[in-house]
Amino acid sequence: MVGLRALSRLSAFAFVAILCALPPAFAKTLQVGPDRELKQPSDAAAAAQDGDTIEIDPVKDGYFDCAVLKASRLTIVGKGDDVVLTDKTCQGKGILVVTGDDVTVRNLTLTRARVPDHNGAGIRAEGKNLTVDHVRFVNNENGILSADSPDSTIRISDSEFTRNGKCEPSCAHGIYIGHVGLLRVERSKFIDNRIGHHVKSRASRTELVGNDIEDGPEGTASYLVDIPNGGGVLIEDNIFEKGPKCSNHGTAISIGAEGVTQRTPEIIVRRNKFTNDQTVETVFVRNMTATEAVVDGNTIAGKVVALAGDGTAR
């Protein structure tokens, strides 16, 4: 028979397990809008505690506002179509400055971020673990700029990056991810970005799956993808296009251009579609690491060298 003391221990473990499965007891939903008590997203961000949700109503002409998201396990979400935060930045960094951990940003448009050092971002990511879902980044210096956080994961899905980028004098990009553990971008669109790269990642592992990354007829971006320090790479099932006005004519995807400073266990580039709309030849994958790149099953149109550097292309 099981003793009373053992039963008590089992009951205590079961009670703790149930508590862990429940949502935070005091998590709140903070509502923002012209007819709400909280009129601006920054009002809700200042009041938010760990585990809360901020819901933002649409407003004509958007919110001239920025916010610092200090709470962890926070979700900030636009309700309805076209919830816009525009023109204003916080701390000289961005429209949303995320310092909390495990934050989710969903269904917003972040546009026209400018700061004095020309490195303003729609989202400045400084905490650990960020999820970005159905967010539009339009005409910012950086769409997303992240700090180094080696154990962090940044996930971006179903989002759009349009007309971001600048080089005055340093370059800003569609997204610029620092030394994090994992960057995964899926089902997102990068179009008509300017001067900088569409995607720049120093992550230990970078995964780009099912995206549309194109210069278009007017885009002036440099690389479509820049992975300057190596790291694990998976690039599959994307659509890539290098346009006639791009600022770097010779390379679409660059790996290791600034020196390989981290372990690069694999480089896999497969089942992508790449079109070069320039009149000059370009390299689809330029591999400057010693890791053998596997460039396999891609569909290529225009004047293109499939691979320059170590590896195989087939």
Image (cartoon, rainbow, N blue to C red):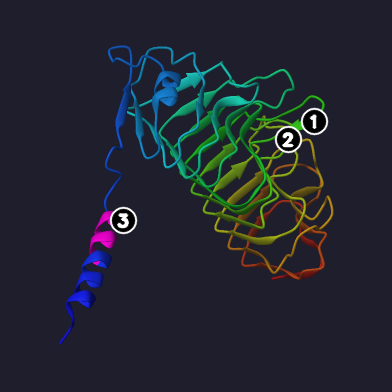
Of 269 and 68, the residue lying toward us: 68
Considering the whole magenta stretch, tell me its main secondary structure: helix
For mark 2, what is the residue?
A: 196
| Spatial separation of the CA atoms under disc 1 and disc 3 | 46 Å
Residue at image position (23%, 77%) is: 6
**Most foreground residue, 129 or 309:** 129
Where residue 18 appears, as percent x and y from the top left, is: 24, 59
- Work out whether 143 lies above or below 235: above
Q: Which residues are magenta?
A: 14-21
- Total marks shown come to 3
Q: Quadrant of the C terminus?
A: bottom right
User: Which amino acid type corresponds to the residue marked 2 in the rendered image?
Assistant: Gly
Circle 1 SS class: loop
Identify residue for label 1. Answer: 170
Picture layout, residue 194 above or below residue 102: above
Q: Tell which tag, 1 or 3, sits nearer the viewer.
A: 3
- The magenta stretch spans residue 304: no
- Compute the Cα span from label 2 to label 3: 44 Å
Q: Residue at x 54, y 41 (%)?
A: 189
